[in-house]
Image (tube, coloured by chain):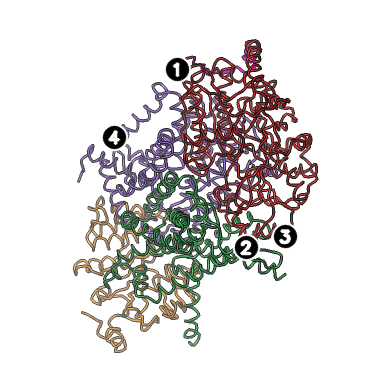
Chain colours: A purple, B green, C orange, D red
Amino acid sequence: MSSPDHAVVSTGRLAQSPHNVFQRLGIDGPLTIFGGPIYWSLFALILIAVVLFPLYGSTFAALNFTNFLINAPVALGLALLWGYCGVLSFGQVAFFGIAGYAYGVMAINWGLGLGTLLAAAGALGLTSLVAAAFGYFLFYGRVSSWIIPVLTLVLTLVLETFLGQTAGLEWRIGQAQLGGFNGMTNIPSLTLGSLTFNGYSLPLFYLVVALIAVILIGLRVLANSHFGHVVMAIQEDAERTELLGYDIRRYQLVVFTIAGFLAGLSGVLYATWGNFIQPSSVGLLAATLPVLWVAIGGRRSLSSVLIGTIALSALSDALAVYSGDLAFVVMGALLLFGMMAAPDGIVITILRSLAKLLVRRPL
Amino acid sequence: MAGDLFNLAYQFLVNVSFLMLAAMGLIIVLGMLNIINLAHGEFIMMGAYTATLSVHAGVPFVVAVVLATIVVGMIGAIVELLIVRRFYANKLNALVATFGLSLILSQGTLLLFGPYLRGVSMPLGGFRVGQFSYATYLLVVAGLAFVLIFALWLLFYRTRLGVDMRATMQNPDMARALGVNTSRIYTFSFALGAALAGLTGALYAPTTTIVPLFGTAFIAPAFITVVIGGGANPLIGALASSSLLSVVSTPLSSQYGTFAGRIGLMLAALVIMRFLPDGLSYYLQAALLRRRKARPESSR
Amino acid sequence: MSLLALKGVYRSFGGITAADGIDLTLEAGERRCLIGPNGAGKSTVFKLIMGLLRPDSGSISFAGHEITHEQPFRRVQRGLSMKYQTTRIFPSLTLAQNMFIARSRAGDATALASWAIDKLGLGALRERRAGELSYGQQHWLEMCMALGNGPRVVLMDEPTAGMTPEESRSTATFIRELEGRGIAAIVIEHDMGFVRDLDAPTTVLHQGRVFRQGRMAEIEVDPEVQRIYLGEIHD
Amino acid sequence: MSDTPRRGADAPEIPNQDSSLAVDSPRRTSIAGTRRQFLAGAAAVGAAGAIGFPAIHVKAATTGQVKFGLLEDQSGNFALFGLPKLHATQLAIKEINDGFTLLSGPTGPGGTGKDGAYTELVDVLVQSNDKGILGREVKLISPDPQSDPRMYQQLTKRLGLQDEVDVIMGAFASANREAMRPVIDQMKKMYWYNNQYEGGVADKYTFCTGAVAEQQIIPAMQYCIAKFGKRIYIPAADYNFGQLSAMWTRAMAPLLGGEVVGQEFIPLSVTDFTSTIARIEQAKPDWLMMYITGQNHANFYPQANAAGLKRPMGSSINLAQGYEHKRFAPPALAGMNVAVSYMEEIPTPRNQAFVKRFRAMFPDEPYIQQEAHSAYVATHLYAVACRLAKTTDQNAVMEALESGIGIEAPAGWMFMDPATHHMSQHIRMASCDEKHNITFVQEWPSIEPWWTRRLGVNLVRTPEFKQYTPADDPAFKKFL
């Protein structure tokens, strides 16, 4: 597993003049591949472009874009878990689903306004708890790492099977009907004062953009911190790391919980975007999507994963609209040949070659 | 009473054989190549399609099954040569690639053959024991599953090829040093896995509706069985885990309904994996070893 | 009461018995050599002390604590530390990053670590990727990492394997100076010259049992030891 | 509540007789006549309606194409059902653009009744004296929602906000319909759900052209109890449709003189029915009311058949929807009796003409199923409503649809009930034999969607945006 890292760090240095302001801020560092003045100026430019989007793009495009952006948190969480911690989880959508349903139940019961905020907080809290509990079960049980993908997959399938059969009227929590296969409808959108964060107006768009910017920067800080180094060390040589005095299970658990929390955030955002959540959002197909986003993006680079996620979401949307029943074939071909052409991930490979053009190697 | 017992036994056998057959191909590929093949379900689907189409073309069912096995096996060989072998260095990528492949295969089938194929009627009819009636065919399939396990055991432990395969599985470099053509072994193993998937599809074709997503029903059980079985000794693993899972799910589903059986199976899987993380086969082997070593140690 | 004590530690793998009732004690600041023919169980002892292996029977105590069933990281936090035989560092990370990771927040070990870095002349290489260092330097880096969180005992498994004579000599000096800083060390070694350089009480392991204890001078002339080594003593 | 079955029972047992048909010359005049009356009222109603629900950006483009948004699954789980619906819609739009329409008019439920001089209509497709809708070509916009609820939501928004279509139709699974409706109501777009389903949707913007529980379950039960006996066993898919249909069956059994001796809810993912079959054997029912569905559940039939489970079966969803009798080798579905609102095999000349047209355009269509028929009729009915309204302006079209308008479908006369936005159906009892041939053994010429009306739903008076379940009906309480 060392050849990718090799690339990581060498390119990492490539993109950074040592100890620049960004590194002092902690948002750049050896464990984030891309960085430095050029990176951050691009970051700023893109952010501005996105924020101003409604001025030059159609409202619908912005709303549609929101739908793609909603996938980013879960993907970034998985990038941290898989790319930095070396733990591949197929179960992120389980936390997506739990959060979505939890938000639905609480929001329906606690009503509009402040209620929805409480619901969001409650949902995220609950999801983090579940993630922590399951993570404890995985890591403190020292489950061997190649089983974890399947274990997490089983978790989501259990959840889907369960949710699918809650059509019965006995599955009612307060005012909220779980609704079985048809899903839970009429979930109120997040509201803050006069602002309503639904899928039909811009507030949600800006909320999501802000959240993603914060998450990206936050994760970069985490990755370059001492914590991040230990996590990376665990992925490279777990036993060695433990013999340096670290309880590696605790680090893995923390990362797993963060990833679960981020997946939950996506779930809540989805529920408030569509006023709706259904079992298929924790189904087999849904479960594979985050893995694909991260793999295509390049799991060692948060920025690449972010771009990859949005690009793939947009692509599948475009395919559905324009290519009709060829959508799956095209998507499949992209994944297949993409992985053959660029094993580290398509986006990261492209960005690397761009970076090489922009910055010449210090060594 | 005896009727009920037979009924339970029958259901148990049917469950075990379903899990075993679903998992068989996957086990070979995972055990030999450490590749998680997400296109496994589509291989099964292609088996069902080949068999069904040939039956419609007038081929007798038995021949059709053999045909399906061979055809899918060859497809598997091609897939390994063109795609899978590029991913041995980076196995998790194989997972993404094979998922892409599965999308192409299933939707491609939809575009090629339409939303469904007319089914094949289940051969051999049924019989009655006590108050219940049963499908003979499913019993035959169950029997076949066990024969298959035995055949694989022979292949692995009684043939030169099998020795080479196990050598490659345990230590490729060493095997290569000993003059084993590992890359051919890999191709063969993947093809074998595909062929077994094809066989599974063909065998279950008469029991179900032939649609492009035929394979998806097999995926989850297959993975659960494989993982619980563990890599240490795939064959023992498959046998043990499918039996264990069926022991859990059969009574549940016959007592409290299929849903209970379903959930029971998955929870059992979670628990087993939590407490036996290396898979049943590992512990079985360890147990065997310990019994063998017991004498010298106690003698001291 | 000694710092580290193994009592009747027994461990077998299937049929092979790797540790057959080992009793071993180490005092604070003491320096100890562990020798013995291949398969004598030297590395197994280290693994047992660090908790990478659990004994089938027997007990291990450290600084008055029963640690037989503790997780490895707890033992490290208590002040045990180990350097692997074949270097296990993080080759893709820079030397500085390696030390950054090794410097766990427990205790103030920074001083010790930087002392070690300078002592072994690695100071100039901070920004170099660990994988690019020379073989000997990688060994040294791992020793520094082993000192990362101020251990009271360092276990070193063949620290000089594959080193040039000069390198092993300075390694020996380095290990001797550890004593001065109150750090006990157990060193597994094949190179008898190096063992002599260390000039430390020596324990001979054979077939998972403690075969002899004493100063190197006596041990070397012991016919039994020579017999079990069968001329493995290269000088 | 039990009057529907009785009406059905009175219906003549002669197969092939499409009893909703009547002399067509009188109807022609009646169309003309009522059209005038309608227009008279239209303005007034329109004004009232404008207050009724202030519509936002429903731009009534008066020139250019009529944009027709359709969401049917072309891939994924439901492609099997989605593709025929897509094709049926394409056929209808082609006919509309070529200047044809189905006979229709605001003539109330039950068509124009049966008078003495009965003559069989040869075809119900006639010249519309209109190319497209009001001279504007109809343009179909049909992205592929891939059987995925999230995709449905996204594409519904796209159709409404981006393409600004005049009407949205589609969805097979109730889950996907329920995914669409919040978006629909939010955008205040007219939406048609052309599928038989569990019933209960009461939504000002939603029109349902498929049959609902009371139109299929009651006749099926009535027929099977009379023919096979009172002991009923219910194997049902463990999701909304299965749960609610089972509820209906339990509720209706006493009224129809039946008795539910057992039921089981089976997860959609289940493919092996060994234990289910065993439990059925234990319960010793006279017949089975089948509510299992989806491609996995279809496995039940060959498995049950091979296991020698030879009990007769009734159903409201099989054959007509999943065309299992074509997909499975005989005799898997022998003894299956389904109350259908349409099947390709219906032997009336008008249907044979329809099938001929369909096959001409899509020669290798596997089967023209119930839902394809609903989609076909809905598309024509929309065109008819637009012509009545003399505009594609959504509010006016909805007014037209709520004016008591009906249409001569290939299956028979269908009437859009203003109060519930559901249609009356010409229900036939289809029976499948050993060779999977279909015969129609009983007919109910016009069963109305009465259940939500009974709950006080009247979308003309009081717009609502919800789906009722039997839980909302006191009469069901005691059976839950």
Give the foreground label among 3 and 2.
Answer: 3
Label 1 to label 3: alpha-carbon separation: 64 Å
* Same chain? Circles 1 and 3: yes
Mark number displayed over residue A37 = 4
Circle 1 is placed at which residue position? D64
Residue type at the position of mark 4: Pro
Circle 3 is placed at which residue position? D282
- Category of crowding for the residue at label 1, using alpha-carbon neighbours closer than 10 angstroms: few (below 14), some (14–19), many (at least 20): few
Asked if residue D395 is positioned above or below residue D323 in the image, the reply reads above
Tags 1 and 4 touching, CB below 8 Å:
no
Label 2 to label 4: alpha-carbon separation: 63 Å
Secondary structure at numbered mark 4: helix
- Category of crowding for the residue at label 4, using alpha-carbon neighbours closer than 10 angstroms: few (below 14), some (14–19), many (at least 20): some
**Magenta-drawn stretch contains C202:** no
Asked if residue D24 is positioned above or below residue B280 in the image, the reply reads above
Secondary structure at numbered mark 3: helix
Q: Which residues are magenta?
A: D45-62
